[in-house]
Image (cartoon, rainbow, N blue to C red):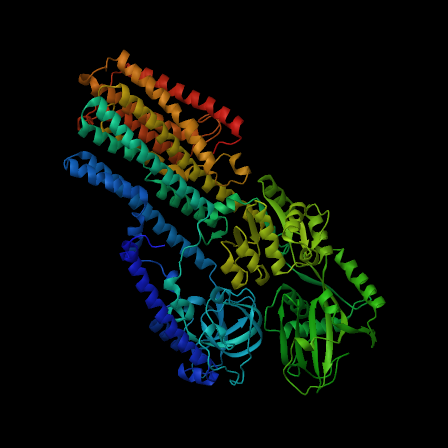
């Protein structure tokens, strides 16, 4: 309900956003109209408009088009200008508070040196954050280049050269390029299909539809639709932002980058991901401290004004207290921590695509992974080719070779193993008489792929003139399509009894840890050249292939190391349950009971949550079931990582808290992941987990140091303001003290963490931070009060005439105790004895303490109204600081016993 006229009046921000939305909508409609027009015309017309042939662009022309159109990037992928980054570095609530306070101070007294100190604090905070973010962005782009996504493009070196298919970085794709798509590929730009075979495309990013949609085979240019208004619905168009789930296709790029349908909408899409729990936690603590400041500063102002009767001085003191309560370095420390973490992880062959994912990696307590490449060597070799009786059979190898050789879709390690085995053994030679007729690409629903060949006579196979479909795939799925079985030189019907015998042979290989694929054929008359999934029926089972992928020698050690760090590993594989059980047992995983995909389908969400909590190995699972497993674990309160590299892993990667892939993964898997491993190795991942926890721990250090120190300072200021007849510390002195303390903490991201801290997953705990602040903060106030009493009664600083001595004494004690708290909080152990900070932290805190001691004796002392302290003060100061450290250690020990945690 509108309650006032002002609600009808748009604000400048609203008006600007509305204008942008209107402009984006108009541009989107224009691009949609152009694409639907392309869809409604034959493919040859699109090629003619783009001045390209089906042979592809010449390399020189491709370079000219790249210069003319620019890189194939949408607006959100473009790096902002450094000036924009600089502006954003100063746009945070803490710097806003400091600027406001500086403005108030300047208006009150333009000559106040505090204005310069505040300006210095603003500049130090903003510029350091800018430098760190600029460097981290640059480093992130460099790291991203190591795992860049490419696409298969057909080009020619010169006009008369034969076309060559080459892998080109996505950003270098230009209008007119001929692109070849296969399962697992990201669609690099808006394409008009020139040919497609059983193509299924996921358009969820554009349409929100979770199920893949079929795209038509338009090889003849006649299968077009008229009357479309949305290019997403065009069955002969593939748009940027979508991905291929199965099948293969060829298309010509009609629009790229910001000119694409997805690119033109980028202005209305938020480029930022939803905040992580860490982001939310930092924001909550930040605004908690700001609210705390807004409450306490007026109290300090009122007490000082009422007791000192100098409201102007009380106001300046309150402003200085507000500055002291503002953790203006927090954004810079967080950014530096994440950037350092990313660079350190890169040295360990772990590439971070999204900096905030580092915290989730450290918080991960369950890792779901496939067995291939993580538990095994990922060095698959073809072990045997055998018939239905388990006897060696070269016919099986010949059929498998033709299947792997002629397929153009998603070729995997099993295909490579078949081709390599035949090439080394030289048992089969494919010559020009073997011609591919068609293929039915692999997908994860059918779990098989088929090719159709027309060939010369070959032992045991049909004669020339006939077409033979050769299918290779998962045993269960392919066996269900077989009606006949090759038995020696003849063919017999595959009865139920024979099926059981055949499965007995297969299971015997599974129990040895061998992966088994079935090979089957079907003969056709040869009167057509287009085949589909419906032709994969009435097959004749030829035999089987068994593959060996031996367990890694260090897999058991890596699993134990992860378990010691509090990370439970669950194996989620599409392989046979017997193979999965064998491999997992080899590497020391407890395999009490393997849960299969069919069992998962029979469970509702509640039963699945109970199931995943009690089981470790899940076999024969499809992509949807993998995603359900991840969701069930997250619903049970776990922070879940998923390690996958296939198209069947993309959904689970998106569902997980931290998606992990490898640089050899398919495009859609790498795009869905937050972390990329340059080696598919659990040992490498363990290093990443430890670095994530180190990054999180150093950030929590700063937050707890700042929160507890500021909370304690407020108590001290309230006590001093209530009972001391003069200002306990001048505003300028508070500002200098705060600046020195802030500088001392700049080295926090370079600190090390205790090994004990790294052994457990770490998650954000806002309630724990509040409790920490309330219980640890007031300790410093106790020793501030003892310092007040010491200066008042022992050194005679008990009136306004001696206030400089009082202020100098508290200035030194306050700065030294604040700096010491860095060492007390950074570890749950005894500092300096059981745990020592890193060299940068020791140097920075030591420099801050030396500055605090020397400043009252320096020529600058008069500028800040300080005076040299009597030498007799320093033994008392040492006793005070030692007592402070001892009491803090006692409270720390009690706190850890009571609450079971420190950082």
From the viewer's perspective, is residue 847 above or below residue 886?
below
Q: Quadrant of residue 308?
A: top left
Answer yes or no: is residue 732 visible. no
Q: Is residue 724 above or below residue 346?
A: above
Q: Which of the 4 image quarters holds residue 378?
A: bottom right
Q: Nearer the viewer, residue 360 or 290?
A: 290
Q: Residue furthest right?
A: 497
Decide which of 891, 694 is in the foreground and name it: 891
In the image, is residue 517 above or below residue 656? below
- Viewer-closest of 591 and 397: 591
Estimate the x, y position of residue 128 in percent, counting from the top left.
31, 44
Residue 144: x and y in percent read 44, 57
Q: Is residue 569 left or right of residue 744?
A: right
Does residue 450 appear in the picture of this structure? yes
Across and down, in percent, residue 812 comes to 29, 24
| Location of residue 175 in the rendering, given as x and y in whole percent from the top left corner | 41, 75
Which quarter of the rendering shows the N terminus? bottom left
- Residue at image position (39%, 25%) is 778
> Is 552 left or right of 837, judged from the image as shown?
right
The residue positioned 21% from the left and 24% from the top of the image is 866
């Amino acid at each position: 309900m509108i309650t006032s006229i002002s609600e009808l009046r748009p604000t400048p921000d609203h008006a600007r956003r509305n204008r942008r939305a209107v402009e984006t909508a108009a541009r989107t409609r224009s691009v949609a109209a152009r694409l639907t027009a392309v869809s409604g015309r034959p493919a040859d017309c699109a090629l003619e408009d783009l001045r390209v042939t089906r042979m592809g662009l010449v390399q020189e022309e491709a370079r000219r088009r790249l210069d003319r159109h620019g890189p194939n990037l949408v607006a959100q992928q473009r790096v902002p200008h450094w000036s924009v980054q600089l502006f954003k570095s100063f746009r945070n609530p803490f710097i806003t508070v400091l600027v406001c306070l500086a403005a108030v101070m300047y208006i009150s007294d333009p000559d106040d040196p505090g204005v310069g100190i505040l300006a210095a604090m603003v500049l130090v905070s903003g510029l350091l954050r800018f430098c760190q973010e600029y460097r981290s962005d640059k480093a992130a782009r460099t790291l991203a280049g190591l795992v860049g996504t490419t696409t298969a493009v057909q080009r020619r070196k010169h006009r008369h050269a034969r076309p060559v298919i080459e892998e080109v970085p996505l950003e270098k794709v230009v209008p007119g390029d001929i692109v070849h798509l296969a399962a697992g590929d990201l669609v690099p730009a808006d394409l008009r299909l020139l040919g497609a075979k059983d193509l299924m495309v996921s358009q969820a990013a554009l349409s929100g539809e979770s199920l893949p949609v079929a795209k038509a085979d338009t090889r003849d240019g006649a299968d077009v639709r008229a009357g479309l208004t949305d290019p997403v619905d065009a069955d002969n168009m593939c748009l940027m932002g979508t991905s291929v789930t199965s099948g293969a296709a060829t298309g010509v790029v009609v629009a790229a980058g910001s000119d694409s349908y997805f690119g033109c909408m980028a202005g209305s899409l938020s480029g930022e991901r939803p905040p992580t729990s860490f982001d939310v936690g930092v924001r909550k603590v930040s605004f908690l401290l700001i609210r705390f400041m807004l409450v306490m500063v007026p109290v300090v102002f009122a007490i000082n004004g009422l007791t000192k009767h100098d409201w102007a001085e009380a106001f300046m003191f309150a402003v200085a207290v507000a500055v002291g309560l503002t953790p203006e370095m927090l954004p810079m420390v967080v950014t530096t921590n994440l950037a350092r973490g990313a660079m350190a992880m890169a040295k360990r062959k772990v590439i971070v695509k999204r900096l905030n994912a580092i915290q989730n990696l450290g918080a991960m307590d369950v890792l779901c992974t496939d067995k291939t490449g993580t538990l095994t060597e990922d060095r698959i070799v073809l072990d045997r080719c055998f018939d239905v009786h388990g006897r060696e059979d070269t016919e099986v190898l010949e059929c498998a070779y033709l299947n792997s050789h002629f397929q153009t879709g998603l070729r995997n390690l099993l295909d490579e193993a078949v081709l390599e085995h035949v090439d080394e053994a030289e048992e089969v030679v494919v010559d020009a008489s073997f011609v591919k007729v068609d293929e039915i690409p692999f997908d994860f629903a059918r779990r098989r792929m088929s090719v159709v060949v027309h060939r010369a006579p070959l032992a045991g196979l049909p004669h020339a003139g006939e077409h033979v479909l050769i299918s290779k795939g998962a045993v269960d799925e392919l066996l269900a399509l077989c009606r006949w079985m090759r038995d020696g030189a003849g063919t017999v019907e595959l009865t139920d009894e024979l099926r059981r015998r055949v499965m007995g042979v297969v299971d015997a290989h599974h129990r040895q840890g061998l992966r088994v694929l079935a090979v089957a054929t079907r003969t056709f008359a040869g009167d057509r050249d287009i085949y589909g999934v419906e032709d994969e029926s009435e097959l004749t089972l030829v035999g089987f292939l068994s593959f060996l992928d031996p367990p890694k020698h260090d897999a058991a050690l890596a699993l134990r190391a992860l378990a010691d760090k509090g990370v439970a590993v669950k194996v989620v594989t599409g392989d046979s349950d017997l193979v999965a059980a064998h491999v997992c047992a080899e590497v020391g995983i407890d395999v009490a009971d393997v849960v299969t995909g069919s069992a998962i389908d029979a469970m509702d969400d509640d039963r699945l949550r109970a199931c995943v909590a009690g089981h470790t190995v899940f076999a024969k699972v499809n992509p949807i079931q993998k995603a359900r497993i991840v969701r069930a674990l997250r619903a049970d309160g776990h922070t879940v990582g998923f390690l996958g590299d296939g198209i069947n892993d993309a959904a689970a990667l998106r569902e997980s808290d931290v998606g992990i892939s490898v640089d050899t993964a398919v495009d859609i898997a790498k795009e869905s992941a937050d972390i990329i491993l340059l080696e598919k190795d659990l040992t490498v991942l363990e290093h990443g987990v430890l670095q994530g926890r180190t990054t999180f721990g150093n950030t929590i250090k700063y937050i707890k140091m700042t929160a507890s120190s500021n909370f304690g300072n407020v108590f001290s200021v309230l006590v001093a303001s209530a009972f001391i007849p003069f200002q306990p510390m001048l505003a300028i002195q508070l500002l200098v003290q705060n600046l020195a303390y802030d500088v001392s903490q700049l080295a926090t991201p370079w600190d090390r963490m205790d090994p004990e801290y790294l052994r457990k997953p770490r998650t954000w705990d806002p309630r724990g931070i509040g409790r920490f602040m309330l219980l640890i903060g007031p300790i410093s106030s106790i020793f501030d009060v003892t310092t007040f009493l010491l200066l008042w009664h022992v050194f005679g600083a008990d009136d306004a005439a001696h206030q400089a001595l009082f202020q100098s004494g508290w200035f030194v004690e306050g700065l030294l105790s604040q700096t010491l708290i860095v060492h007390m909080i950074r570890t749950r152990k005894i500092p300096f004895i059981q745990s020592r900070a890193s060299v940068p932290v020791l140097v920075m805190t030591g420099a801050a303490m030396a500055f605090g001691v020397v400043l009252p004796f320096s020529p600058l002392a008069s500028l800040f109204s300080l005076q040299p302290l009597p030498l007799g003060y320093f033994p008392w100061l040492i006793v005070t600081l030692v007592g402070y450290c001892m009491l803090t250690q006692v409270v720390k020990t009690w706190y850890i016993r009571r609450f079971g945690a420190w950082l």
